Image: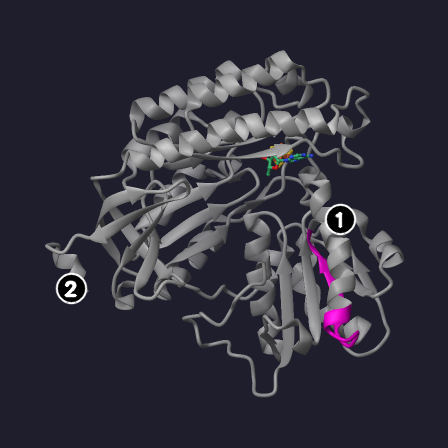
Amino acid sequence: MAIRIEHTIDNQTQAPEGAKKLFIKSYGCQMNVYDAVRMGELMKPHGYAMTENLAEADLVVLNTCHIREKADNKMFSDIGRMRDATGGKALIAVGGCIGQAMGEDIMKRAPEVRVVFGPQTLHRLPEFINKAGLSGKGRAVDTEFPELEKFDALPLPGAYGPTSFVTIQEGCDKFCTYCVVPYTRGHEISRPAEHVLNEVRHLAGLGVKEVCLLGQNVNAYEDGDVDFVDLINKTADVEGIERIRFTTSHPNNMTDRLINLFAEQEKLMPYLHLPVQAGSNKVLKDMNRNHTAEDYLAVIEKLRAVRPDIAISGDFIVGFPGETEEDFEKTLMIAAATDYASAYSFKYSPRPGTPAAAMTNQIPDEVSSERLAGLQALLNDQQEAFNATFVGKETTVLVEEKTHIEGQLRGRSPHNIAVNFDGNERLIGHTIRVKITASKPKSIIGEIVLNDMQQSA
Ligand code: 5AD
Ligand code: SF4
């Protein structure tokens, strides 16, 4: 998706008159979406304004994802498309995880690409552009891993509505056998708590009410004696912050302290994204997940004991090498036992350089496709049923934006469900009460509760 910067409520870093135009396309995870916004902000003082119109772009950045093969292929087909759409006049740069993983090879496969960099050096983008020359013929590649340098070098972020991501941790030391993240994003590193809190205070000052703490293994956060629970509590103490979420968590880092926080910290929203990937202990072992299906279910049970209404979300991979029909049945069973509010599921995609790609018992694509369809049918039913439980009830909504329907607004409930309702756009940025009147597969619909004093905001 192209990142829109024009909704900024931070006017301090407007690009100058006659600015050059920057088009960013981001693929993959939320970390990438966040990085793309940061790149836009980084380039502003260098005279670049964001555009959504490829034809007028001077600089095109493809902020790529390497997690599944599909994302790789998409990037290579997009490069040619973008070269044509810009009439060959824009500098094309590849950032993100493919940049990190493939480096120089991208230049060989795609001669139109003149700059390649990875997620850890995106702050050096102005330097790369200088080196390659915006309208010259030079080229620059950088796939270094300078830990934390990026965070010190980036300007404080802008706000683009009442919710914002804040990266607190990056990288992964878990080395699941199917996954490229430890290779593309590097080791687990945590940002200093004081830096994170500064950023949260800054965002709150710009009107942000909800922050989502972001990291590949967010609940492995640690800065000296400040652990993840401490960081959440400190974030909750920042004036103006009403809601806190975090993503993505690993089951092995779900400490009792963190689980109990869902009962104790009222600003922590009752929603948790906790991937399990598979339900068979044999597959989990081959994936190097270091937990069993029972361990995962024990965490879910504890969470529900302290916070019965918690919405659980997850990730699944089907068709991992060696997965038998019986193994897959166990995935269906763990999904049924967890009863997800929403979940993502993927067909296993072999990634070059990962241990699973070298496993000899790969599963035929038709088998994986069939399993994926079966799992998704179950997960969709669960989501629909979860959404339906809210009909007739009231929920709070932090109003985020107008929808494309005249007079309609959209926000999120504490359980992270998109809520659509009619209302005045002045309500954007306010937390209001909405009575849910209907549910859909992926969202719920409601009416503003009018006898609420808040509504006069
Ligand atoms: N193939 C398919 N899905 C994958 N994921 C990670 N690596 C792969 C792969 N090689 C999924 C996992 C992870 C999510 C971000 O992407 O489910 O949680
Ligand atoms: Fe990848 Fe596993 Fe690390 Fe998640 S925990 S980023 S799936 S290696």
Q: Residue at x 64, y 30 (%)?
A: 174
Q: Nearer the viewer, residue 151 or 30?
A: 30
Q: Which residue is mark 1?
A: 73
Residue 27: x percent and y percent? 63, 52
Q: Which mark is nearer the camera, 1 or 2?
A: 1
Q: Residue at x 43, y 72 (%)?
A: 10
For the view shown, which residue lies furthest in the top direction?
326
Give residue 3's quadrant in the image.
Answer: bottom right
Q: Which residues are magenta?
A: 84-96
Q: Which residue is mark 2?
A: 456
Residue 444: x percent and y percent? 33, 45
Location of the C terminus by quadrant is: bottom left
At mark 2, the secondary structure is helix
Give residue 393's quadrant in the image.
Answer: top left
Question: Distance between the Cα atoms at labels 1 and 2?
Answer: 51 Å
Residue 160: x percent and y percent? 44, 64
Determine crowd level at label 2: few under 14, some 14-19, many 20+ residues with C-alpha closer than 10 A: few
Q: Amino acid at mark 1?
A: Asn
Q: Residue at x 85, y 71 (%)?
A: 138
Q: Residue at x 52, y 66 (%)?
A: 4
Eyeballing the image, is 338 above or below 8? above
Ligand 1 closer than 8 Å to label 1 CB = no
For the view shown, which residue lies furthest in the left direction?
451
